[in-house]
Image (tube, helix red, strand yellow):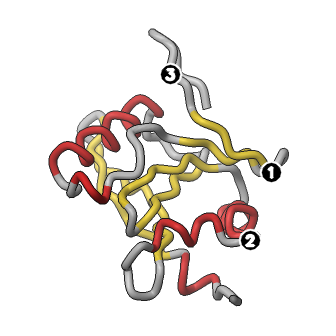
Amino acid sequence: MAIKTEEIFCPVPMPRLRNNARSIETIYLISSRSRQFGAAAFFYPGVKEQAADILGEGYTVLPSSLHEVLLVPDSSQIPVRDLQNMVKETNRSQVEPKDILSDNIYHFDNFQGKLSTIQLERGKEAR
């Protein structure tokens, strides 16, 4: 199955208030054309690498639901802990229990081509 980049990667502007200054973070969405069970598209051959090529860097993966996965570029100013909390809170308040993928967040290293779970240590953030 061939995948066209524009069908998978859709930038989603995310307004964010930071120190009383308004800035926009861009988060990228991966899903299927029908938006049904689209999170699986992230695991299609070459998609993780293609996303890194498009973004020009590694990224954090937020498993939004069975239907979509969000990608946050490493250059984002959103703290990793905030991303983790966002996934947990969204899972509790917005996602049907049957559609929850994980409370974990992940990192794709564009140099190693490796996907790994982000482990948050007390008082530290590591990407």
Residue 27: where, in percent of width, then height? Answer: 45, 60
Q: Which disc, if any, is residue 125? A: none
Is label 2 or label 1 in front? 2
The amino acid type of the residue labelled 1 equals Gly
Image coordinates for residue 33, horizontal then vertical, percent = 45, 87
Q: In the rendered view, tell whether residue 82 sits above or below residue 16.
A: above
Q: Which residue is mark 2?
A: 45
Residue 71 vs residue 46: left or right? Answer: left
Please name the residue shown 26% across and 44% down the image: 17
SS for callout 1: loop
Residue 90 lies, in percent from the top left, at 25, 47
Residue at 21% across / 57% down in the picture? Answer: 96
Q: Which residue is mark 1?
A: 113
Residue at screen point 24% across, 38% down: 20
Q: Amino acid at mark 3?
A: Leu
Camera-nearest label, 3 or 2: 2
Pointer 3 and pointer 1: residues touching (CB < 8 Å)?
A: no
The disc, 3 or 2, on the residue closer to the chain's N-terminal end is: 2
In the visual, does 3 lie left or right of 16? right
